[in-house]
Image (cartoon, rainbow, N blue to C red):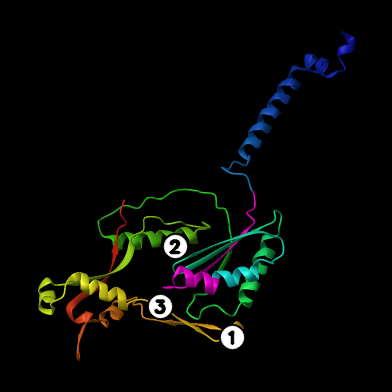
Amino acid sequence: MKGHKTDLLGIFAHHEVAANLLMLMMLLSGAFALDRLNVQFFPNFALDFVTVRVVWTGASAEDIEDGITNPLEQRLKNIDNLNKITSTSAQGISSITLEFVEGTDPLIALEDTRRLVDEFRNLPQDAEKPEIANVTRYEPVARLLITGTDDAAELRQLARRFESELLARGIDKVDVSGLPEQEIAIEIDSGRLQELERSLDQIADRIAALSRDQPAGVLGKGQAARELRSLDQRRDEWGFSRLPAVTEGTQRIDLGDIADIRRQATARPP
């Protein structure tokens, strides 16, 4: 028995308080570490993607592809560490996604992409400024449901106010879904239509034909080429009120003379 007095078991056998103190220290250390354990839904990882988005309101998918998507792809395909490039050309918008080799510095990839896009001077004149961004992963924190009266405009204001307050308190990103959309409402009295000998469908077709932006060809060649475009799409109440709803000879009746035009919010269908 004398040989066991100097080893660990022997010390604990003869000093019961030391064993209890060691056990207590282990329990406290475990509780302390558990309180600081990193818990999250997904592991930390980087997304090696950069997106380029260009809006050209009113342009067809063919015009978008010829005037924006293809020229930008030709410039971006030789960027350093590029693994794959994909693009989508739809009506009014061009979207290009660049996938870089794993481990590429996202800031350098973003700056190289922005530099090449900024150097491209042949974008259509009416196209909006390109939006270039890294694809960022956000970890969801909470969902907020907003309910209230049937007034869609009031719900829209509440959603925007809550969005601003959350961003001001440090939330990185707020996604809003189900937000009532804005629309221009045009109402024409049936009696007025009978006086004009027009149907509601005829007035609607005329509005659709007159209120639209259309490409008008290309001026020049090569790097000096510029897209021509007619800017006829109306975007507010005053613009719609000036549309000629009826023209017969020298007679012209504007839409604002026969219709009630107002901006309103509408709830999305469930």
Say what amino acid the circle numbered 1 marks: Ala
Horizontal and vertical percent for residue 66? 53, 72
Q: Secondary structure at mark 1?
A: helix
Q: Who's the residue at 31% across and 76% down the image?
A: 209
The residue closer to the viewer here, 2 or 260, is 260
Are there few (<14), some (14-19), or many (20+) residues within 10 Å of tag 3?
some
Q: Which residue is mark 1?
A: 224
Q: Which residue is mark 2?
A: 164
Magenta range is: 45-68
Q: Who's the residue at 63% across and 35% down the image?
A: 34
Comes first in the chain, label 2 or label 3: 2
- Distance between mark 2 and mark 3 Cα atoms: 36 Å
Q: Is residue 151 left or right of residue 4?
A: left
Q: Secondary structure at mark 3?
A: strand
Horizontal and vertical percent for residue 136? 58, 56
Q: Work out whether 268 lies above or below 221.
A: above
Say what amino acid the circle numbered 3 marks: Gln
The residue closer to the viewer here, 232 or 225, is 225
Task: Using the image, tell me which numbered label, if any, was put on residue 214.
Answer: 3
Say what amino acid the circle numbered 2 marks: Ser
- Distance between mark 3 and mark 1 Cα atoms: 21 Å
Q: Work out whether 84 lies above or below 35.
A: below
Comes first in the chain, label 3 or label 1: 3
Q: Work out whether 183 lies above or below 145.
A: below
Residue 33 shows in the view: yes
